[in-house]
Amino acid sequence: MGFSTFDRLRLSLAFLLGLAPALAAPDIQVPPPPITDGLFPCTACHDGKTMKLNLVRRELKDMHTDIELKHGPASRWCLDCHDPLDRDRLHLASGQKVEFTVSYELCGQCHGEKLRDWEAGVHGKRTGSWNGQKQYLLCVNCHNPHQPHFAPLKPMPPPVRPGATVAGKGGAL
Amino acid sequence: MKYRLGKHEPAGTQVVRSRRTFLGAAAAAMAGAMATLTGCDRNGVEAFLQHNFRELSKDEIKQVIARLEQEAKQKYGREIHIGNEPPIQGVLFGYALDLSRCIGCRRCAKACVKENNQTREPQIEWIRVLQMDKEDGVDITHADPYYDPELVPQEGHFYMPVQCHQCRNAPCTKVCPVGATWQEPDGMVVVDYNWCIGCRYCMAACPYGARRFNWGEPGIPAAELNPVTHYLGNRPRPKGVVEKCTFCIQRVRKGLYPACVEICPTGSRKFGNLADPASEIRYILEHKRVFIFKEELNTRPKFFYFYGV
């Protein structure tokens, strides 16, 4: 529930008054963070015991080879965002840990303007009700965090040209 | 036959108020006779004698809707609901489309057809997505609506979907000779398909090419018919009338987003209440670079283009 200051104030006020369910109608996150099946929790492998922590920047050869990192400068790598000591979380530049479900706080460190627009409901998709509860998506639901450029899509078929409508077949005339 | 009464007449008084009501009443009285003489069925005669939607009383609207629902059932073999939700007080609908995000995938145009019961054969689509050259900028003379590559967006191009702009100073409603199209208090420009005579003056007047004419009998597979409709919106249309985008009047008057907003995979489409300072649409108008298509024509659209990046 990371929305405008106003929303946060309203929420805290509602909780203070014990009216949370009545007053607060926070928007709903629809899909979960898009983590490949079977990979979460990360600590299943990265437990710090069977697999020792390796802080050396390197090309991954044994696992996660499908991930091609095309995000920001070439010097960027996994542990800039993934927390080395708590693999089930991410971390901000400050070291503060964040859950995968609020990864927008991490994205917003560089893309502050986008985060502001997103919180206002202007960047990214919103569905639901224009005057009521909305559903939102995380940044990573549309932008693969490792290759954030929006993936091209196959377009739906073009409209028929006016001449293509056949007379007499429910068409013109 | 009941005549329309003024506010201050006691109930039960029957007064002929005007030439029109008199003629209407006389004509209605002849309905039975006409039905026999012309070979039209009762519904056909009632449809012929129906008044402009804005002149109908609540009871008359109920009767008209019941008749139209029955006709739709005959044609499609399915129950449909024709709603008559009124405008919401204090709401003026506005729309904004992010030109820097739209990738031209046309999912909006197709979702619109499904939601709003446009005819499939012959084809009508209310939204037209124009592909333009980045070099030329917004230039209608070089726009291509028929692009069909493997993937979009294409290098060097941008995409501009065009639909009804719901103008505050709408040329289409001014030219209608019979008053079959008008602007609702919440801003939607609507058509009474039962009052439209099919002259297509409105289509000539619209600078956005947003209106479509039913040249043929609309062809919609019964299974694909959306049964949730509105009288002024997506109810099944007859041949020979003009139709157009209503921002999904059947959805937005219930608080839902229009179908094109719901489907857009890039989140380029934004919708809300222009009268609400906290709405998304107001945020866009106040913070983004906004572009009004053909602004020089003074149509004052409630549909805006903006650059989110």
Image: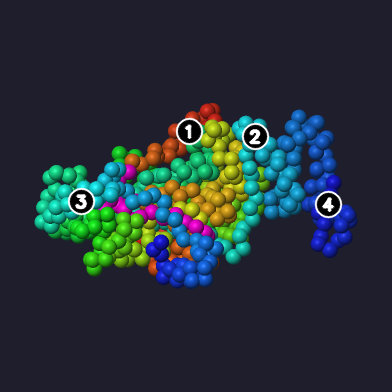
Tag of residue A165: 1
Please tell me whether mark 3 or mark 1 is closer to you in this view: 3
Residue A63: image location, x then y, percent? 17, 44
Tag of residue B3: 4
Other residues around mark 3 within 10 Å, as few (<14) / some (14–19) / many (≥20): some
The colour mode here is rainbow
Tag of residue A46: 3
Residue type at mark 3: give it.
His
Residue type at mark 2: give it.
Lys
The subunit carrying tag 1 is A
The subunit carrying tag 4 is B
Query: In the shown orientation, is residue A94 left or right of residue A124?
Result: left
Please tell me whether mark 2 or mark 4 is closer to you in this view: 2
Residue B168: image location, x then y, percent? 55, 61
Q: Residue at x 78, y 33 (%)?
A: B35
Q: Secondary structure at mark 3?
A: loop
Range shown magenta: A131-153
Other residues around mark 4 within 10 Å, as few (<14) / some (14–19) / many (≥20): some
Where is residue B197, by image quadrant? Answer: top right
C-alpha separation, residue under disc 1 versus residue under disc 2: 27 Å
Please tell me whether mark 1 or mark 2 is closer to you in this view: 2
A128 and B67: which one is in front? A128
C-alpha separation, residue under disc 2 versus residue under disc 4: 31 Å
